[in-house]
Image: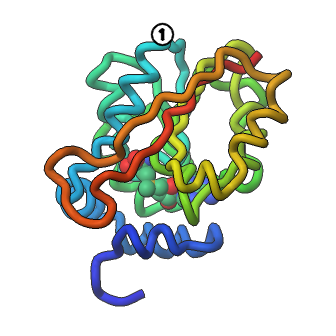
Amino acid sequence: MSDEEPDLDAAYGLKTPDDSKRLYAAWAKTYDAGFAARMDYCLPERVVKAFVGCCPQGPVLDIGAGTGLVGAHMAAAGLGPVDGVDICQEMLDVAAERGVYRLLFLGDMTGRLDVVDGAYGAVISSGTFTTGHVGPEALDEVLRVAATGAQIAISVSKAHWNAAGFAAKFAELAGQIADLKLKTVRIYGDKTEGAHALDEGYVVLFRKG
Ligand SMILES: C[S@@+](CC[C@H](N)C(=O)[O-])C[C@H]1O[C@@H](n2cnc3c(N)ncnc32)[C@H](O)[C@@H]1O
């Protein structure tokens, strides 16, 4: 890894979970004040807003919690308790400093989390189901850790939705989920400029049936 701050192009170029661990370990300390501030990164707030509108019941699991931007918006909305899981300890260390999570733990969404079946009343995720990160196959693990009836809200970048087969995976899960809705949101705010300024994602809202 070079001394330069990692950027979006590096993030979208990730290939493996180990690549993610390395990139985010190098990014953790500058992610909020650098990337999130410079890009006017609004996705976590928009995912939380859509999630809260569905009246979820805790405890909530934040998947790919990163530096805890979702947890901060959840705390502002008065919703909890919230646990966070991420593949990168350095990102979780930054999240811990916010003091808004009940528990933060390491886990790889491409495998099995150290969580019992049905442990969470709701699941949220922002920015983690995206190019180079986590694909539709992880939805089975999301459903395993969610309780029956749990509200789930995950963002999926539009480019990843199309390229990674999310539509086919949701069709396959039709008998296990209910109330599926897609809400289109911009990932960045009006203050951002450059090639990714108008990037969009879906907030995918559904319940475990
Ligand atoms: C773009 S950041 C999003 C962080 C935070 N949710 C936000 O919106 O700011 C993506 C996060 O996903 C985590 N991640 C990447 N691959 C993962 C995996 N296989 N399992 C769990 N977390 C993963 C990264 O470490 C990183 O913290």
- For image coordinates 54% across by 36% down, the residue present is 154
Task: Please state if 39 lies on the left or on the right of 207 as rendered.
Answer: left
Residue 119 falls in which quadrant of the image?
A: top right
Quadrant assignment for the C terminus:
top right
Residue occupied by mark 1 = 55
Q: Nearer the viewer, residue 62 or 158?
A: 158
Q: Position of residue 10 (x, y in %)?
A: 43, 75
Residue 160 falls in which quadrant of the image?
A: bottom right
Q: Position of residue 99 (x, y in %)?
A: 31, 37
Q: Nearer the viewer, residue 16 or 189?
A: 189
Number of numbered callouts drawn: 1
Task: Please state if 107 lies on the left or on the right of 99 as rendered.
Answer: right
Outermost residue toward the left? 191
- In the image, residue 11 sits, relative to residue 95, either above or below, namely below
Task: Please state if 82 lies on the left or on the right of 166 as rendered.
Answer: left
Amino acid on which the number 1 mark rests in the picture: Cys
- For image coordinates 46% across by 49% down, the residue present is 127
Q: Nearer the viewer, residue 118 or 41?
A: 41
Q: Note whether residue 111 is visible.
A: yes
Q: Position of residue 27 (x, y in %)?
A: 35, 69
- For image coordinates 32% across by 34% down, the residue present is 45
Q: Nearer the viewer, residue 66 or 174?
A: 174
